[in-house]
Image: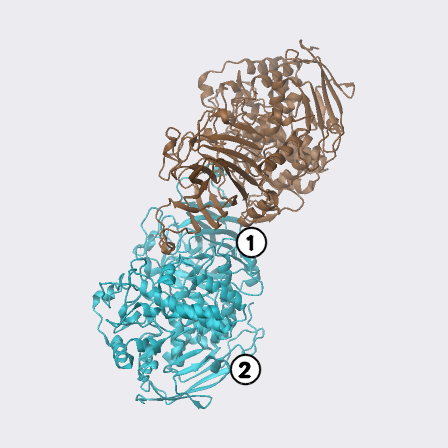
Chain colours: A brown, B cyan
Amino acid sequence: MLYLTRKLLPLVCLSLSASPALAQDKNLIQYVRPMTGTDRMGHTYPGATVPFGMVQLSPETDTQSYELNGKYNKDVYKYCAGYQYGDNTIVGFTHTHFSGTGHSDLGDFLIMPTTGKLQLNPGTADKPESGYRTRFSHNTEVAEPNYYKVKMEDHNILAELTTTTRVGFHQYTFPKSDSAHIILDLMYGIYNYPDKNVWTYLQIVNDTLITGYRQTTGWARTRTLYFAMVLSKPFTSYGYQNNSKKEVYGGFWRKFKQEENFPEIAGRQIRAYFNFSTKEDERIKIKFAISPVSTANALDNLHKEAPGWIFNEVKREGQRLWEKELEKIEIKAPQETMENFYTAMYHTFINPTVYMDADGSFRGLDQQDYKAKGWTNYTTFSLWDTYRALHPFFNIIQPKRNGDMIQSMEAHYDESVHKMLPVWSNSANENWCMIGYHGVSVIADAIVKGNADMDGKRALDACVTTARHRSYDGLGYYMDMGYVPEDKNGSSVSKTLEYAYDDWCIAQMAKKLDRNDIYLEFIARAQNYKHVYDSTTGYMRPRMSDGSFKKEFDVLNTDEAGFIEGNAWNYSLYVPHAPAEMIKMMGGNRRFVPHLDSLFNFELPDKYFAATEDITRDGIIGNYVHGNEPSHHVAYLYNWTDQPWKTQERVRMILKRMYHPTPSGLSGNDDCGQMSAWYILSAMGFYPVAPGSVKYSLGSPAIDEASLHLENSKTFTIKTKNQSAKNVYVQKVTINGKEVTDHFLNHDDIMNGGELVFYMGSSPKKK
Amino acid sequence: MLYLTRKLLPLVCLSLSASPALAQDKNLIQYVRPMTGTDRMGHTYPGATVPFGMVQLSPETDTQSYELNGKYNKDVYKYCAGYQYGDNTIVGFTHTHFSGTGHSDLGDFLIMPTTGKLQLNPGTADKPESGYRTRFSHNTEVAEPNYYKVKMEDHNILAELTTTTRVGFHQYTFPKSDSAHIILDLMYGIYNYPDKNVWTYLQIVNDTLITGYRQTTGWARTRTLYFAMVLSKPFTSYGYQNNSKKEVYGGFWRKFKQEENFPEIAGRQIRAYFNFSTKEDERIKIKFAISPVSTANALDNLHKEAPGWIFNEVKREGQRLWEKELEKIEIKAPQETMENFYTAMYHTFINPTVYMDADGSFRGLDQQDYKAKGWTNYTTFSLWDTYRALHPFFNIIQPKRNGDMIQSMEAHYDESVHKMLPVWSNSANENWCMIGYHGVSVIADAIVKGNADMDGKRALDACVTTARHRSYDGLGYYMDMGYVPEDKNGSSVSKTLEYAYDDWCIAQMAKKLDRNDIYLEFIARAQNYKHVYDSTTGYMRPRMSDGSFKKEFDVLNTDEAGFIEGNAWNYSLYVPHAPAEMIKMMGGNRRFVPHLDSLFNFELPDKYFAATEDITRDGIIGNYVHGNEPSHHVAYLYNWTDQPWKTQERVRMILKRMYHPTPSGLSGNDDCGQMSAWYILSAMGFYPVAPGSVKYSLGSPAIDEASLHLENSKTFTIKTKNQSAKNVYVQKVTINGKEVTDHFLNHDDIMNGGELVFYMGSSPKKK
């Protein structure tokens, strides 16, 4: 059992005794809608997981059947999480999923219970009866934290899923059948294509225990996942299909009698099945443990985490863990805000994911196995997204976990032959997705906020070495010339701006650690945003290696125009560490405020929308693209002008329009929790525009009240007066009774406990 | 440094001090001809290895270039050891080779030094300049134990190779060049075909250290080998070619500057190269360590075994180890016999190979990693061949090693999901090659001879469980019906006969261990050879499941006629555990002796020869096929008749005709040392017709004298009187002065030390 031991204030009366009933007075779990974001762009999954769990056991609805010789789903982008709410067939349940990404991988170890004639191919959505998949209806579907249920109509089986950190627990209620099957499809994966599977291996150890592994090359280039699967009742017989091309030495193992089972198989395209007879309403359960290191460790994980067979106990224990996490922040708010808020908290406590066995073992970036002693190893670092609000949120509400995440990043650095902190890492692989080296921001934010119990020198060395890696993505040019030249390296403006911010983070960290030499080096680099500012147009603009700005320049163009996931209009605002200087550079309030206004008011022509992948029409307000992270700080920039009330107005509008607790309620990819973290902090009324700073920018809270129960045993309370949907404007703010005049909240104000009060009204408070 | 510590008799004055010079009085190494068997059928390799070494560093002469889209050498059978004496180009040097097999695998980590324009494909033998391969001449070639040298003409480089147990040590002497290269080709392998490579991985850790691994599927279905490679001087630059089809997420790592090196690559078809400038006669050395478990272990192996850079020291140390092994038997004989004998000893001390890191780690059959404590783990168990004479030879001269080999086989059994001892195993894989379960013979022979310090109960359990595996290769039928029925399972007669012999071995072991119940069960099964004897024809004959003998019956037919690597004529003689009963069954001396005579005198028509793969015309005397193991005991069968002198005559003829210390001097595959073990024992005058028995059948020695220095510190001496090429007939034999009248030698006679004397003459000693 995984207990978090911590002292709770009397306000929270959670029973930690043997009866794991949910606390009578709260039950915050009831507000979580895991279906949020499963329709279209959100790319979340509805299945079961525990906070930061290594297993994410969820249904797959991919409409096509991947078969060996082509014919796979060209709509691969939709299925990053394996599920789309608009689909009406389920192909099976797999044990690993990303939450809210824009790229695909995982989907390991598909389990599918069926009845009737055994069909060993998935079938297609338009003809489900041609394979093992089943029709289903959302009417029979239930999705709660750590619990998923659905009726599988074509097989007349009720499927229920729950998990522990490392074990997926399936419960299937069968009809009476003398041809019931459990299919284990090792061919299946999320984003499957020829050569995705490198190798798979399967051992039928006895009639209830199966072990093996799956090795793939995809977004993670060299990834292996091991499993141990235990059945609640012995199968009567089993078999498998090896769909690989004829193996050269394949003849030898066929010396065994064909009609008898052969307990060991390996190859690239394996499907196995296990046969049963079932009585009416008989339940067959499966405990499916995974490990990044070995099948022996998977079995050990299983024994330690899920020794029993009572499904509801495991479900309740996971839900107790969720309740405990959610209760870290108790809010009062209208119903929809409650649902948005706790659904967002649920989504922020999914990634990064635990990547470590019960005994501390994990696979490192160099493909060697290591043991973590005294810390937990994590993976799934979507850092380009999550440095912005997710990790800063963790510095408030999950500081110990955040410290372990940083430890995991430093282990990655130690194992890295490039000597770089992670950029975008998962499952012992760096996939280099997106730009920047924002690991330094996460580390700097923790050090500057004093939240992490870490070796500052080691951390700083890792950040500095990373930031001096000349051959990485234009960094050599940036170091030599002060900007990335577009003719040498694309998306050059975005890179220059993000490197400048990252360098500022290093400078803050160096200052805190009394390293003045490093401070001076990197605070100088932090000014480099100025080198890509074109005063003639008033925008950041791609610059060439000869010093001139790029001639062709359309400020709305997102396609190979010098920017990534954005255009000159919205990306030019990316100087989060120096908004005052940026505004001054752009002509001061007089020119900047109308410029910022027009961002939100702009009518974006269709042609510009079409080129951008990760957003929906809903995700755009004018030219403000909330679905794309570079914009996430933008609404708060009014705080550095003479019209701060516009921040309050924009933030409340975004909170209201961009988030709904419905399947299509996320306007863009949740991006491993970043979109959700934006909601949580903004709904509470503050946002970390520049992580690496101790300051938060004040906005306009959507909640009525909030209590943050911190790990240091203190409570930070947020209250509002005169709050309503109309009263978006802040009239006054006090911290512990003292008025705040500069639109900022300090980190210490939060961590020392105390009270922040917003006085709301329907008219802007102008000077 | 790997010392064998043992007490030596004063006769052997080997210096164990710091100057590892070869003993002045012996220098047996000078008689070893590693080139023996490298032309045509022998399938041995000329390269460097230490006794039972894990590394076999040897040149590849495969004439075709394997490229990704087909076009590979259809003559794959010739290249089981990667080298054919008749070729005149070398494509590179790889680190792992089988010695004398009939199937292919290994050939890992091809290293090729070149000068001039970098060409990253191997080229072909008819156009070597089209790739990196080189012409060479046997005139510049030197092959000694643990040393190989050749001049690479197209690149003007002198190549020298030596090894320790786990490290290949290369020394390349370059001309002056500003474009010298070392190529590391991870695509290359022995018997390469599409999909052979599962995955390869490479890390350029710094400018002298490279690590990685190669994962293949072939004869070993799931095999991975790790390496660590250290250069004696830093490269100036490096690069690689990834010949895989375009990777789906391949774009991300290309964010690094193209013209700079990227230190980490993974994929299926990788070739890497390292660039240097060299002065005239400059030497670049490479230490290349391997490991079955991890790159960290490979590096540890390297540090422990080869910390220095002096090539000659490593060469001399390995040769010292060889000299020590060879001096276990000192003979006096004519020059050619000396060369045959010590070349054969060299070939018998190559397999099985060490499969374990310096720290005891190895990969088990279940793909998990284990640690051997107090024993050495071995692999490459070609048991269908080696149970006959190789392991019995080890029971005399390598009893401790043989005990570790049995321990390795038992570990395999423990890890086996089938619960079977190995059949044909290599590199943590069972490939099930050939027939029978002859592991039980190896174990029984050791137990019965009292040579192995092992847990008899554990060993017997493993043997019995293996022998009761019903679904293995007709064994269920054999157990139920007393024979394997040909209509249910091919090669049924060979299987029946070999199972009967294996079962007799289990009975001997059970008797020694006082397990009467098991003894009775298996001594009954040992009679099953009678069930396939057809008295109407006088041959063993395939029998059907309805009890009748197969109608079509051509006693010379080897092709799907009920036999494997043989025909009814020679295989009918395979009752090694009961020759007296067999002869009686076949009509007694009166009918059997002429029958046996005709085997040796028969004119075999071409059509029968052509169907058999592993033999040459030279390997056949009449219908006696020495290249095929089932015949190996046959020449000794006269000892059970009234014409024992014919054994002496046949054995001397085989020794003379079938073995020459020349490249084409082996008439069939050496079969991991079995052919060589036959030579050694027969040349000394005795042979274990039925391993599992304590008796050896006497023949006719070809040597003048031999001293066997045993591990128990005793010496067994063999002497001859009146020996000559003509004097093949034995007039009298004494053991410790007492005359031997029954043509047998007991194992204890050998192990107690003492003296065996053969009195030779030119006429047969008839009764």
Three-letter code for the amino acid on which mark 2 is drawn? Leu
Observer-nearest residue: A200 or B199? A200
**Mark sitting on residue B296:** 1
Three-letter code for the amino acid on which mark 1 is drawn? Ala
Position of residue B765 relative to residue B518, above or below, is below
Which element type, helix, strand or loop, lies under badge 1? helix
Observer-nearest residue: A715 or A9? A9
Residue A345 visible somewhere in the drawing: yes
Mark 1: few/some/many CA within 10 Å (<14, 14-19, 20+): some
Observer-nearest residue: A664 or B658? A664
Residue B627 visible somewhere in the drawing: no
- Where's residue A450, x and y in %? 72, 34
Residue at left offset 31%, top offset 77%: B583
Question: On the rendered structure, is B262 left or right of A468?
Answer: left
- Where's residue A735, x and y in %? 76, 21
Q: Mark 2 points at which residue?
A: B9
